[in-house]
Structure formats: C-alpha cells, structure tokens
Amino acid sequence: QDAELVRTRDPQRLAQCDVVVDVGGEYDPERHRYDHHQRSFTESMRSLRPDKPWTTKLSSAGLVYCHFGSQILAGLLGQPEDGPVVTALYDKV
C-alpha cells in the first residue's frame, strides 16, 4: 500500500528495489525478482506448483500471481489462504 513505484531499467536502481517485476533479466523469488525475458526461462504454473495442471510458460505477471495470488485473494476475501474458496478462485483466475 505504501510502496514507491519505480520504472527503470537501470541496474543500479534495480539493485536498490525490494521487488523487481518484468525487468532485470532474472527470476529469483527468494530475492523478489520476477522477470521472464531470459532465454533459459521455462517456468510454468505446473513447474512451480506441481499441484496445478497448467503448463503454459509464465509471464512476469503470471510469476507474481503464482507466488502471491493466494495470499492476495485470501486478504481480499477474508478467507484462509489454503481454504476451498481461495483455492477455487485462484484456479479460476
């Protein structure tokens, strides 16, 4: 809610960011880097969450949804993250 949004491709600026999406050339969820533009990138929902059947290669938005979608939906709905309502909605979106 109080995050500062920075639009840049400057590696020095990106290094200072807490979360980087769709730029930077790396996918590293432990460091909150969510880019899909490197040639070696092949992740799908199924490769990251084997309980899900979808095998389409993820975009940066898909990576963010994969990692945070359930948490966000749970917060919006006031439901448990692993509950049936959140799980059903996550799968439909």
Image: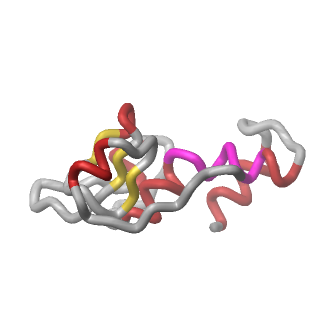
Residue 61 picture location, percent across and down: 46, 65
Which residue appears farthest toward the right when viewing the image?
Answer: 78
Q: For residue 72: magenta?
A: yes
Residue sitting at 24 percent across and 56 percent down? 24
19 inside magenta stretch? no
Residue 27 at x, y percent in the picture: 28, 47
Residue 20 lies, with reference to residue 48, above or below; the image says below
In front: 20, or 62? 20
Q: Which of the two residues, 21 or 46, is positioned nearer the viewer here?
A: 21
| Nearer to us in this view, 11 or 65 | 11
Q: Nearer the viewer, residue 23 or 44?
A: 23
Image location (x, y in percent) of residue 13: 31, 52
Question: What segment is highlighted magenta in the picture?
Answer: 67-74
Q: Is residue 6 above or below residue 17?
A: below
What colouring does the structure picture have?
secondary structure
Q: Is residue 85 left or right of residue 18?
A: right
Q: Count of labels shown?
A: 0
Q: Residue furthest top?
A: 30
User: Which residue is painted at 29% across and 53% down in the image?
Assistant: 43
User: Can you tell which quarter of the image residue 57 is in?
Assistant: bottom left
State the predominant SS element of the stretch in magenta: helix
Residue at the (29%, 62%) spot, across then down: 23
In the rendered structure, the answer to whether residue 69 lies left or right of residue 37 reads right
Residue at 45% from the left image edge and 41% from the top image edge = 18
Q: Quadrant of the C terminus?
A: bottom right
Q: Is residue 87 left or right of residue 77?
A: left
Residue 62 horizontal/vertical position (percent): 45, 62
